[in-house]
Amino acid sequence: MSVATEPLSPPQSAFRVGAGAVVVTTSTVLPVFLTGALSVQISRELDFDPAGLGLVVALYFGVSALVSLPVGRIVERLGSATTSRIAVVGAAFFMLLCSIAARSYGSLIAILLCGAWCNVMGQLSSNLTLARSMPAARLGLSFGVKQSSVPLATLLAGVAVPAVALTLGWRWAYVIGAGLALCALVAAPRGGRETPRDATTPENRATAALSVIGIAGGLAAACATGLGIFLVAAAVDRGIDVGLAGLVLTLGSVVGLIMRMLHGWLADRRSGGHIAVVAGSLLLGAGGLALLAVPGSVALILGTILGFGLGWAWPGLLQFAVVRLNPTAPAAATAIVQVGVYGGSCLGPVGFGFLASHFSFTTAWLVAAGVMLIAAAGMVLGRRMLRAFGARARMTSS
């Protein structure tokens, strides 16, 4: 597989490269998290329950998993400048379509599924931008900053509840989201410093280890996606005011954003052990999910802080580790892990919504905590496989 050579342009500053990756990723992931945050208002009009919300999100990430590998190849071929713009315009279009044409539960599902590829392309094009244009000494921080786009999208979605949905209506929240996405075109990467990879150069991709890590990431994402999608609905079910629940979601998003950047900053100052840090974060994040099963606003706030700050702060660090292992084809390599992550994000909401609808939100949070513990163990196994792969590679080259 070869990497596209984009037209040369003046060198970009590290700040612009990182900022462009953030706004592109935030814009393209916003539709699904906006849907989750607005679920209380949307469900009243379109008539669906938590299980229905889980199905919407599950199908969205299921489609994302299916298209991840082919989209990764497209991004490598066309380059980041082109594909990032395609992804942003696509996300804006489908958010506008949600505001206008989502007149039933079925139409909402159809619109979100048709736009799922925008999120995948936005993520992978941003990965390629950082891998090709960011100085090596800041690569870890840049991935942490880029992945802060997910809690940033959740933050925007949380703010949209009291600021827009409860005043103007949920459809206007999608209109405003589409406008923000189009504004992101200004900061989209120019590309221009990518060089083609020699097709005869082996990619040296630890596919088996990456697959195990992808499965573990999928289990963790299953729990974390439930956190972002169902937190407001779960809090309202406990009797907490919907406006306050939206603000708690905003708080968690801010904590997650800061922790993702901190993870990246620390990664640039370590020589290794990144996967082990991911495993530790998942272990502590499971405690946060368990706290969400405890009644009361204090447990809700503490559980949200731990859940977002640790249980959902690892994606940037994980992608950084994968890119460091596969510098010749970063978009294609991260696509392997993303298949697992998107797959987990697909199955997680379905399972969480089923448990919440047929048992209780308490049961759903406790099961999610247990699954996140299993994910931490999977990361440890994947790390051992990576180390074994590295040892074999060194022996072969010596």
Image: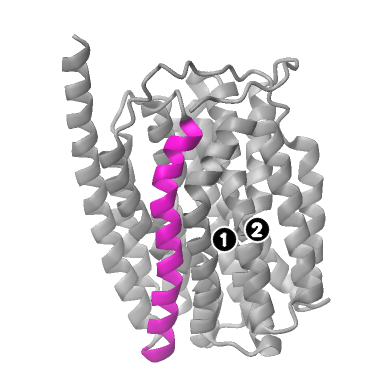
Kindly identify the residue that appears in the image at 52 percent across and 45 percent down.
Answer: 70
Looking at the picture, does residue 268 appear above or below residue 371?
above
Q: Quadrant of the C terminus?
A: top left
Q: Quadrant of residue 34?
A: bottom right
130 sits to left or right of 333 = right
Q: Position of residue 96 (x, y in %)?
A: 79, 64
Q: Which mark is residue 30?
A: 2
Q: Amino acid at mark 2?
A: Leu
Q: Position of residue 174 (x, y in %)?
A: 76, 66
Give the secondary structure at mark 1.
helix
Nearer to us in this view, 11 or 206: 206
Q: Quadrant of residue 369?
A: bottom left
Residue 90 part of the magenta segment = no
Tell me which numbered mark, 2 or 1, is placed earlier along the sequence. 2
Kindly identify the residue that appears in the image at 50 percent across and 76 percent down.
Answer: 54
Q: Say whether marks 2 and 1 touch (CB < 8 Å).
A: no
Farthest residue in the front direction? Answer: 200
Q: Is residue 90 visible?
A: yes
Q: How is the image coloured?
A: one colour
What residue range appears in magenta? 330-359
Looking at the picture, does residue 69 appear above or below residue 269?
below
Q: Quadrant of residue 380?
A: top left
Q: Is residue 147 visible?
A: no
Distance between the Cα atoms at labels 2 and 1? 17 Å
Q: Which mark is residue 328?
A: none
Q: Which residue is mark 1?
A: 251
Give the secondary structure at mark 2.
helix
